[in-house]
Image (spheres, rainbow, N blue to C red):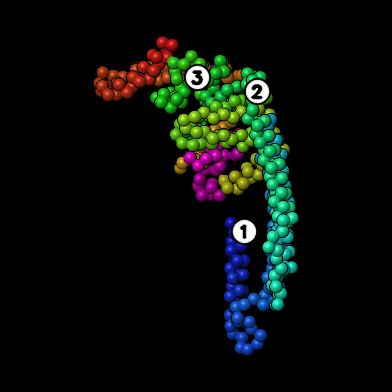
Amino acid sequence: MTTLLILIVVVLLAVALWQLTKIFDLTQVGGNVNDTQVANDNDNKVNGYLMFGFLGFIYLTTIYCLLNYSHFPLMSDSASEHGPEVDRLMMISMVLIFFVQTVTQALLHYFAFKYRGKQGQKALYFADNNKLEFIWSIIPAIVLAGLILYGLYAWTNIMFVDEEDADDAIVIELYAQQFKWEARYAGADNVLGKANVRYIEGANNLGVDLSDPNAQDDFSSSELHIPKGTRVIFKMRSQDVLHSAYMPHFRAQMNCVPGMVTEFSFVPTLTTAEMRDKPAMIEKVSNINAIRAKKSEKLVAEGQSALDPYTFDYLLLCNKICGASHYNMQMKIVVDTPEEYKIWLKENSAKTIVQAVKTAAAEAKASDSPATTKDSTSSNSKDTTVVAQAEMK
């Protein structure tokens, strides 16, 4: 905020000096005052030097930003097998952009000064120059073609899953809805049961087809657990609008489209505990907590509760503006060791969606009383009917 105020003051001061200069010129009687509103050689010379000054400002600002803000945790701390390849492609693109920007800005400002207007000088121009046009067309074409081909190669390697990897992979569904995520695990058979939004009813909030044999061991979780070193294949669905499953540390993003199933897969390479122990992450968490501690002092002084200390966690975010609470649509991701994942799976696999529906139906039936109206009895019996169909499989 202080920096913004300083910039505003500097801008206002410049405007004030400019206005004072105009007033001074207007008060001069006689003298060598140019009031023709036509630029002369001196005006062009001043503007030429100002162009050089602005070029220096651009370069100094760039150097300052590189020295102070060139540490990008998300450009080095990837946690998936394909992450380094994505980071490499990003760095190549940034280096090329930086080089081209540096050269073109220098040439632009240099030629603006060298070929500034002079009294009696006529502009020299070429109606066409095939050689120049070929050079400035073919070089960008070759560079862009190289980047595009490299990007397609990287994308193909990321998206292609051969049969051997698919057989050993874990299948998990990411279900998006305004404004939360829910994960559905395939259970012991590693095959997700069929699902459709038309089946959403009562406790069956994911729309699972309870009569499908593959759905009998499916269970859901509000926290995504995945094992290190094992390929995870995500099947993604959306209940309402277009969402985008974004897992920044895993360099993974895929749209969740209503009415269709999209897919993405990756192999986690760092557990949550290992990522927390990385020096760069320790430094980042320390800086965040220092800011939160300073903010907490102000909150406590105002009689409010202090902020909790920040602890790093992987997150699943929505990268589409999906509604008013889009900013709050996130889910914690925990990367476990294979042993920890097996323990978590054992603790949660018994809490199947089918069992949750049965329990909800039983509770609804037990809560019915003789005074219940016909309409409410009809609505409460829906889950019971679905469960009965599932039990008749």
Distance between mark 2 and mark 1 Cα atoms: 54 Å
Looking at the picture, which amino acid does disc 3 mark? Gly
Residue at 74% from the left image edge and 68% from the top image edge? 114
Q: Determine which quarter of the picture holds residue 250.
A: top right
Looking at the picture, which amino acid does disc 2 mark? Asp
Looking at the picture, which amino acid does disc 1 mark? Thr
Of circles 2 and 3, the one toward us is 2
Q: Find residue 364 and report its horizontal and vertical position in percent.
A: 36, 20
Q: In the image, which disc is placed on residue 193?
A: 3
Could one spot residue 100 in this view of the protein? no
Question: Between residues 369 and 297, which one lies in front from this camera angle?
Answer: 369
Residue denoted by label 2? 162
Q: Determine which quarter of the picture holds residue 38.
A: bottom right
Q: Find residue 316 and report its horizontal and vertical position in percent.
A: 57, 34
The span picked out in magenta is 298-322
Residue 339 located left or right of residue 199: right
Of circles 3 and 1, the one toward us is 3
Q: Name which of mark 3 and mark 1 comes first in the sequence.
A: 1
Tag 3 and tag 1, C-beta contact below 8 Å: no
Q: How many marks?
A: 3
Q: In the image, which disc is placed on residue 3?
A: 1
Q: In the image, which disc is placed on residue 30?
A: none
Q: Find residue 377 and report its horizontal and vertical position in percent.
A: 29, 21
- How packed is label 2: few (under 14 Cα within 10 Å), some, or many (20 or more)? few
The C terminus: image quadrant: top left
Q: Main secondary structure of the magenta part?
A: loop
